[in-house]
Amino acid sequence: MRLASLLLCAVPLVAAQRNTISLNGDWKMADSVAAEPVPAAFDHAAPVPGLANLATPPFKDVDKFDSREFIQTSIREKKLPESARVENAGVPRQERNYFWYRRSFRVPGKQPVAMLRIAKAQFGTAVWLNGKKVGEHLGCFSAGYFDVAGSINWTGDNDLVVRIGAHPAALPVWAPAGTDFEKYKWTPGIYDNVSLILTGSAYIESVQIAPRLATSSAEIETILVNKGNAPVTISLKHVVANWTEFPPHVRLQPGERKAVRATVAMPGAKLWTPEEPNLYTVETSTANDNIKTRFGMREFRFDTATKRAYLNGKLYFLRGSNITLHRFFEDPLCKRHPWEEQWVRKLLIDGPKKMNWNSFRFCIGPAPEMWFDIADEAGLLIQNEFFIWNGRGYFPPYKSEELITQYTEWMRDHWNHPSQAIWDASNETDSDMLRETVIPAVRKLDLSNRPWDNGYSTPTGYDDPVEDHPYLFSAYYGGRGKFSMTQLEGMTGAKTTNAGHPSAHAVIANEYGWMWMNRDGTPTLLTEDVYKALLGPDATPKQRFELYAYNLAGLTEFWRAHRNFAGVLHFTFLTCSYPGVKTSDHWKDVEKLELEANFADWVRESFKPLGVYINFWQPALKPEQKRTYAVMMVNDKPITLSGKLRLEFTGAASTELKFELPAYGAHTWQVPLQAPAAPGAYLLKATATVSGQEQTVSRRKVEVR
């Protein structure tokens, strides 16, 4: 549901129609140990939307909390004794349980219905208006709605107070607050828009739009509510561009809530794709209410028989990365950037275009609604993941009914976004409750019938995908083994048992690499053993950056070339980076969004729609050694591509052939080439050239000796 995001500055068309007032801005703040009463003094200030660590003056120990999963990991790593294990959400390391926000506002005139909407806040929300408590909301990743009509002052100032939990343990143990084994800081805040919705007594609660491409139409479900004391007859109207639909009149009794479906014919409507993200807006109106909802004409699905993804009925390969925004929240350089539109646009529009990406997974935690608006415009397919990561063998004591409530709200907030492509119930988790109870209960609510991913569980639906995390270099972690890129020459790129197994479903490799480095070029906690083994203990940041980019590009080429995955998404584009973290990203300057140069060069090349992969990883050749090189190519485009393929040792021997690759095709060329006569360091390059588009280059570092 998008009641606020598109109407923040709306002016009512008639006296009784909807008026949505933004309450974003600077709010006063306080903290407390007890849940009540409201604090007497609010001596801090912080932005909304934002996080509590942005308050001035700052709060002490604002985000210190040891989660249950962090404690479990520390016990496994022998950093804590077994006696430290907890069954609740974790252990606070701060002298408070709650943060409080306060601001005042005025309204332009009296309306029968007044709803406060808090798009997202963590950890748990309670609201007071003019001294009266009006409600609570447990969800940390979905919008909460609060009926404030009975407490509002229609003629003067209103005192609004919002309480949130200071840490996950402020919530009941049976309600999700987010689980992450690698997250060290848990920062609370009202981290999405806050708005006040004023409208008539018979009003539109929500609108859901489901494109129907076969008939070039849009099915629209409107939820109507009558909060008045008398029966009403409502006349609905849907307007999309030049197309209009008048559903039959609806009779509502006092207190009744009713769903009404209608179909708007849209002959000749333009489809939404990442390449052409065409958008439409439907205005849904009654005599005394109206909502504008933006959507795109697109359908997205997976097919188990072919193990592929299909966009608008056509084969489509996902290429992209991950954004772990809730980890970036703990980064010292996060600041207010996630709520700065220009920064987010550069991240989601300029970044993917530069890197040849068409998709992202918003990993273990959702983004603010502005991010989805921008993703719609950028043409990104989003795998939207609910904030649960618990692995195999353990699942928190969540109540299934609470999960069903929160997943329903989470879906409602996103299902009109064309960028919302995949519902992702969890990360690397195998849960009977999610697979057998929660997903079956909520998936039918989505009229677009989007596919569901569920971590390491086997799929719920016949055509749902599974995720795979083929971390080949993790073999080095803890001295368990070894891995060399030379092993790729004899591998087929098949999915691992990290995926939902056993399963014959389509697979997305949405994590791989295991060579993370901090932005200063030092290894993370998970990769110290990797770099010691590959480069020795005295390697420089420059050497590590070069090796990371080289291997990551090679792995990307490898996974794409073998066509065993419907999507290849590297981990990760944005996360936190500071001493002691376990993963990191690729930013030279995250505030200016300047990528590390080696990553931008090598990995960008590996994600081009025309993919090239030399299946050769030997570090050395003999002078003038003759051999045949397997050059694999893939075409992600819906058209045949033809051109020239050149294989060469830079500055030495080369050979060239013509190629033709059908739409979505893949082929291997066996190309003979003789090594240079002169000893030295060379690049073995395979360059594919198609008239009118960028070349694609696969490169291998080879020493002739």
Image: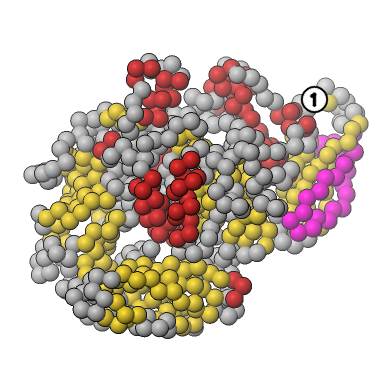
* Left or right side of 407 for 552: right
x and y percentages locating residue 4 in the rendered image:
33, 64
x and y percentages locating residue 163 in the rendered image:
20, 47
Q: Secondary structure at mark 1?
A: strand
Q: Is 651 in the magenta?
A: yes
Task: State whether the magenta stretch is mostly helix, strand or loop.
Answer: strand
| Region in magenta | 648-674
Tell me if mark 1 has few (under 14), some (14-19) or many (20+) residues whose alpha carbon lies within 10 angstroms of its own: some
The answer to whether residue 275 shows anywhere in this view is no
x and y percentages locating residue 271 in the rendered image:
58, 69
Q: Quickly name the residue at label 1.
A: 620
How many numbered callouts?
A: 1
Q: Is 119 in the magenta?
A: no
Q: Amino acid at mark 1?
A: Ala
Q: Is residue 596 above or below residue 21?
A: above
Q: Quadrant of the N terminus?
A: bottom left
